[in-house]
Image (tube, grey):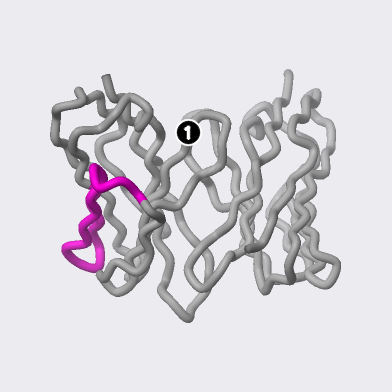
Amino acid sequence: DTEVTQTPKHLVMGMTNKKSLKCEQHMGHRAMYWYKQKAKKPPELMFVYSYEKLSINESVPSRFSPECPNSSLLNLHLHALQPEDSALYLCASRIGPNFSYEQYFGPGTRLTVT
Amino acid sequence: GIQVEQSPPDLILQEGANSTLRCNFSDSVNNLQWFHQNPWGQLINLFYIPSGTKQNGRLSATTVATERYSLLYISSSQTTDSGVYFCAPPGGSEKLVFGKGTKLTVNP
């Protein structure tokens, strides 16, 4: 089963709200990723977790806070977002460092900040 | 870091036509992924191709790592092939570097 799931599918939030995006995989992968994708652009890497530890933070503003509570689950906590943060947020996973580079993507969460 | 260029940026076809999408990259790579992003945003893995040619139904991909390019062939296109096609070689030990994509529209 090569499936990555994401919830919710759609999210509308105000600039003062706190919300979380959730990503789950049960493939035994040990690397998980958050990407942000604006319309008509390719995905941009935000964070990478390897073996549940944050290994890459692409200078993402602190209003985005990732969390990896276990090897199957990845969260992205959102707080005090701006309208320009509206985008498609994609989660991906990969077997792990030193293994195949192949990444598997979830269906995404379409976020609108009002 | 590695630079990735995809061409053409846009492609419009009639159903049943064949097409070739190209991905050029600036450094040698050991592998490369091709994705199809459907109109709902889902990124679907098409190929993970270290080198050589792979085929899956009407789609095939060829990577010539020594010449720094990869090609994606779509034969007998269908309306469901519409969307954006991305190529993405690795850009370090943990990252993928995405091209800007080719937007394909297949008309009935």
Q: What element carries label 1?
A: loop
**Taking B59 as reference, is A38 left or right?**
left
Which residue range is magenta in the image? A60-76
Question: Residue A32, image x and y in percent?
Answer: 35, 62
Q: Quadrant of residue B6?
A: top right
- Quadrant of the image for the C terminus of chain A? top left
Asked if residue A36 is positioned above or below residue B88 in the image, the reply reads above
Asked if residue A71 is positioned above or below residue A84 in the image, the reply reads below
**Taking B58 as reference, is B20 left or right?**
right
Question: Residue B63, image x and y in percent?
Answer: 77, 64
- Quadrant of the image for the N terminus of chain A? bottom left
Q: Specify the principal SS of the magenta part.
A: strand
Instruction: List the residue tagged with mark 1.
Output: A38
| Residue at 75% across, 30% down | B10
| Residue at 65% across, 48% down | B99
B20 or A3: which is nearer to us? B20
Q: Is residue B93 magenta?
A: no
Badge 1 density bin: few <14, some 14–19, many ≥20, Cα 10 Å: some
Asked if residue B49 is positioned above or below residue A20 in the image, the reply reads below
